Image: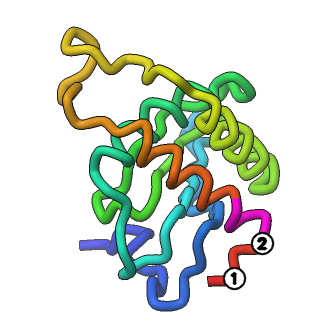
């Protein structure tokens, strides 16, 4: 069985925050799909709280689409250290990072979580805007400080 791409990356030396192009898929008809690792927390340290991850998922997926119309999906990592983002067409890692920082800054201004009602969300009680904002602030600071961890 082939190894999943993320299992081939040495998590003991991975820095956070960072944006990493994890995979490029060239589809049979010439289309391109890229998968990005949006790493918020250094692996094998303290992961993000589940409620923060859930809220960040709703907000990042919403706000990144303000600037990008080629996003397929933004999904949380099971390890709770970041997100995977799938996009079509070729992109620059720096552009993805710029849009991510834009979204994180918008989160700091957010007063309501989109799609967080019982009708809209499969686990609507498990959200924390406060924790999402705390995480967004730390990630922004990490990018500004050159992700020194």
Q: Which residue lies furthest to the top in this view?
A: 119
Quadrant of the frame with the C terminus: bottom right
Front one among 37 and 25: 37
Instruction: Estimate the spatial distance between the alpha carbons at disc 2 and disc 1, rounded to whole Å.
Output: 7 Å
Rendered location of residue 103, percent (x, y): 66, 37
Front one among 4 and 83: 83
Q: Name the residue under label 2.
A: 145
Q: Which mark is residue 148?
A: 1
Taking 125 as reference, is 38 left or right? Answer: right
Q: What element carries label 2?
A: loop
Number of disc labels: 2
Q: Which region of the structure is painted magenta?
A: 141-145
Q: Is the magenta stretch mostly helix, strand or loop?
A: helix
Q: Residue 31: in sight, yes or no? A: no
The residue under the point 61% across, 59% down is 139
Kindly indicate the quadrant of the structure image that contains residue 20: bottom right
Q: What element carries label 1?
A: loop
């Amino acid at each position: 069985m082939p190894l999943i791409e993320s299992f081939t990356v040495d998590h003991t030396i991975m820095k956070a925050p960072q944006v990493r192009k994890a995979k490029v898929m060239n589809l049979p008809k010439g289309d391109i799909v890229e998968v990005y690792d949006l790493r918020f927390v250094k692996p094998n340290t303290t992961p993000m709280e589940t409620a923060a991850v859930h809220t960040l998922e709703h907000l990042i997926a919403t706000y990144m689409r303000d600037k990008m119309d080629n996003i397929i999906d933004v999904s949380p990592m099971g390890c709770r250290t970041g997100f995977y983002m799938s996009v079509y067409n070729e992109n620059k890692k720096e552009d993805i990072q710029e849009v991510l920082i834009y979204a994180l800054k918008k989160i700091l201004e957010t007063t309501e979580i989109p799609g967080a009602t019982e009708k809209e969300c499969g686990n609507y009680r498990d959200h924390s805007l406060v924790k999402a904002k705390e995480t967004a602030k730390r990630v922004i600071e990490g990018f500004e400080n050159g992700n020194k961890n």
